[in-house]
Amino acid sequence: MIVGTSEIVGLIIKAGIVLFLALNIVPIMVYAERKVSAFIQRRIGPEKIGIYGVIQPLADALKFILKEAFYPPGANKFFYYIGPMISVLSPLLAFMAVPLIPILQPIRTELSALVVIAFSSLGVWGLLLGGWSSDNKFSLLGALRSSSQFISYEVSLSASILAMLIIYGTFDFVKIVEMQGENIVKWGVLLNPLAFLTFFISALAESGRIPFDLPEAEAELVGGYHTEYSGMKFAMFFMGEFVHLALTSCVMIILFFGGWNMPFIRISSLLPPDYLFTPVLEYAIGFGVFSAKLLLLLGIFIFIRWTWPRFRFDQLIRFGWGTLILLSLISIVISAIIAVL
Amino acid sequence: MKLLKHKKLSKKLNLFIMLEKGSPTEATGIIAPPETRYKNVERTPSLTENLYVKAIEGFKVTIKNLFQKKVTIRYPEERKELPKDYRGRHYLDTEKCVACEFCAAACPVNIIFIAGEPHPEKIRHPRIFNIDILKCIFCGYCVEACPTGALQMTDVYELYSPERFILTIDELARKP
Amino acid sequence: MGRKTNQEIFEKISLICKGLFTKSRVRDIPEFVVPKENIIELEKRLKQDGFNMILDLFGVDFYDNQKLKDYAEVNSRFAIIYHFLKIPDNERIRVIVPVEDGESVPSSCSLFIGADWFEREVFDLFGIKFDGHPDLRRIFLPEDYEGYPLRKDFPTKGVKEYIGTKYTPNFVRLKDRNKKHTEPLDPFEEGSRMVVNVGPTHPATHGTFRMIFELEGEDIVGVDLEIGYLHRGVEKNSENMRWEDFIPMTDRLNYLSAYLNNMIYTEMIERWCGIWDDVPARAKFIRVILGELSRIADHCVSIGTMAVDLGALTPFWYLFRLREEIYTVFEWAVGARLTTSGTAFGGVRKDLDEKTINHINYIVDKLVPEVIRDVDGLLTKNRIFIDRTRGVGKISARDAIEWGFTGPSLRGSGVAWDIRKVAPYGLYEEFDFDVPVATEGDVYSRYLVRMEEMLQSARIVKQALKNLPDDGIMIKSDKFANIPRLPEKKYVYTQIEPLIHHFKGMVEGVVPPFGWYYFGGEAANGELGYFAISYGKRTPWRIRIRPPCFAIYQAFRHMVLGHKLADFVAVLGSINVIAGELDR
């Protein structure tokens, strides 16, 4: 395959844009999480830095960067450093195959669903290596928990993605979104609500948030796999978690909520057909719709975190293997029936 | 819906959801002394609770509270109103003090040190009056012991100091 | 069916234990002096009669005080005092076992498991050995510490300076769980076990104490507890203090509900001196109001921190908002937030003003139900929370009584035991409230009990506020010379008689009658009791504190064994261990 210079440049630009967007989710999430949790708990939250504390995440980042680069004396230095990098890189790489709007998909492939699953599953290596290498029993326990948890929920996550792929008959995210269209009845969430439920729960577990934040359960494991981490290395784990959350939310929007489609209204019908900037505007509105959906989903994730307690480890695994996989298999059957009909 | 309330079915559903039910509620008798009126608050989770449906009700609480008035006090700018006889930093009215050392005697942790000197009007006057504020437990016994009302406690609770922890007579005599 | 009087109990026990004791009498409760050879036989007979709890076990050093020895009718230097309790009949007896220096006493652990840590404490602080105790190590002080601090000849500064901490773990193992007690085992007998150290600084230890777990996977198969990081020697300190000066010390026992500690201590001295009936009703009401408010605050912390440990962060904030409002009341009603020292012998130190009463009304009428409803909505019906707490840390009523449980933890096991009901002190007889009980004995039950207890406390406060009398806050009568009434400041410096009163009150302080006295009340964690010996001077000879969570925490080992690592935080939160009270 011969790749032209313009294609490479385009790829780099697209990748740069996606990277920028994906990484910007982190400060937004940090701010939103702090502010929403504060409001839920009837506190004020950050308000000193910037208006209503909006640049608080920047201050946090500055603090992380300025902290001493410390590593525990008994640690395996190589893995200790590489762990957080893997955990932040894997969801970022997976993001490359996620079309926020049709043209913004750096890895343009018909197998984008597979690419996303493949890359996002790598993230657990970071936690495992980081937890194992930092020479701490709590870290080790957290790492072990995280590996078994993520691998368990990977199954039901993939199964529920599979259920949707059966309905759409393609691996291509762009085609999936186009098939859903603006007609809300055709959206995945209404086609197969069970698959949505299992996907939602698995996504929650995969991103390691309450009620599934056992790898870092601070009550019993101090900090879990990142007990010994500080400064930028800790921030990378942190970013990895948020980017992963954003990634699964994006996949959820694509699979179940019609991607960049506005409900009920076709975006192109709003715009004059022969205007010069019509395609650009269409993409812009599509991106706006996508972002709105994303923020809504992330808001729900935040709400869940500040409402529920966490599971116990054995309950989590039992729930994953006993209930969730069963449900996701049922959802595959439902999908098959729908596909046949 | 009647069917769902059936015990056997509910048990089966629980089994399906969890494969392991929480501990079975055995009918254990309550041991109670005679004449004690007690209230049994034990409860068994209902089917909706077991199906995680009731867990979603938690969002009602969080969403309700999201729009409520905030209760935080922005501390350095806003302050809580405190009573005048709050047990904070001490204040010594040197005009009234007769260096009788009652406060030193009453102090449970022995942190008050007084040296008196003769005084023409009130016979004795404190030359040195030290309170080791780091050891102080703020019980207020010294104030109660003071026969003249010279030693008081104020509503000053910010007792930070870079290095000095012993309040001398000059610092104690400063009005808050 | 009425309650048995002390005399009846005394006659009954005298009959049952005939020939086992050398001296016997009835003081505040029936007392028996028993030679140490007979103590096991006596315990057996008591157990047959239904006495099921060693409420307290502690030592006393008479040193060279012949008068006290005569009072106790013993001839030895030391005595070990047992308080036996019968639940639910509330029969209490005291057994005094004389011991000479260097002698040892048979251990009661085989009959009453709850004696375990109490005997270790006596060994630690008095150096009296217990024969047959399975795990006789020092409990507060390091292993290689020199001297026994509660002996009268121990210098206050210590025998020599000690720096460091030496501790050898001795695990209670899962396989021994059903046995009453364990033989000391080699901690590393199986290589597959992971030993995890939790504390003294760990997010789940709210206070400073240390737990060492042996894990197989995530299952806890062995556990050892080390306490004593917050041991300040309160009991030793008390020997050099006036009786009043001990009130601020009681703040620092269970610092989450300091007012209850003050209240029980003050009431003990008042009853001992025989002035309880002359304490004005308003003072008693104020004590009940503030005491119950601090009970609510204590339960707030207990439930809130447990929820945080289980990952639910929001209930904590709602509960702490309530607690903050209660502390605002304390600021105005006492003048301090945490360490209240709010009571004085003969009354309370500060009156409630109109504003404070309105604020309390707002708290009990609106805030408490609102917060409880919110927390209820977040936790009680949440399947995840139920899964985390149901069946975890289970303890049966029988075991709980045997370990010495009192308070909410015992009520969570299905025993409706509340000192406020069975032996009403304060003014609790006049208020209408229920004792919440839950039958399962697990974390969830204890949580339910605490939640209901907050509502019941609010109910008591409401009734008290409605009937608040107006007859002063300090004792008025002049006939009690041993309670100094400090005259008003304006008279002290101008008139001679008030000055003398003031001087006498300050210098002599309160001197309770020669002898000893025990009084226990319902603190937030269970029965907090004070046993004090007065030898007619302005300082106590000994004050013994019966800490509720000391007895509860020793059973923690058996409550977490076999559970997952994540469960210990739930159990720990549910029994609400307060290091200040645990270590004293």
Image (cartoon, rainbow, N blue to C red):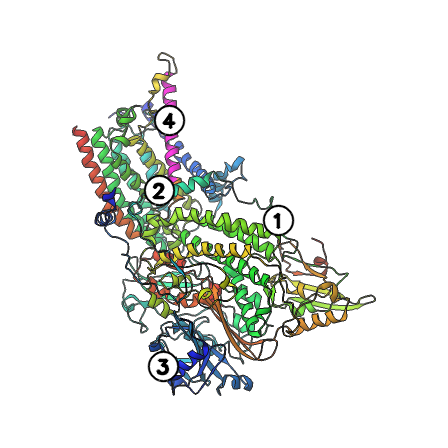
Q: CA distance from mark 4 to mark 2?
A: 27 Å
**Residue A289, disc:** 4
Magenta stretch, overall SS: helix
Residue type beneath disc 3: Ile
Q: Residue furthest left?
A: A340
Point out the frontmost of discs 4 and 1: 1
Callout 1: SS:
loop
Q: Which residue corresponds to mark 2?
A: B56
* Above or below: residue C422 compared with residue C219: below
Q: CA distance from mark 4 to mark 1?
A: 49 Å
Which residue appears at 26% of the width and 34% of the height? A193
Where residue C479 sits in the image (x, y, percent)?
A: 65, 74
* Above or below: residue C434 compared with residue C89: above
Chain hosting mark 3 = C
Where residue A297 sits in the image (x, y, percent)?
A: 36, 35
Q: Which residue corresponds to mark 3?
A: C40
Segment colored magenta: A278-301
Q: Are marks 3 and 2 in contact (CB under 8 Å)?
A: no
Q: Which residue corresponds to mark 1?
A: B81
Where residue A76 sits in the image (x, y, percent)?
A: 35, 52
Q: Locate the N terminus of chain A by quadrant.
A: top left
Q: Residues within 10 Å of mark 2 (few under 14, many from 20)?
A: some
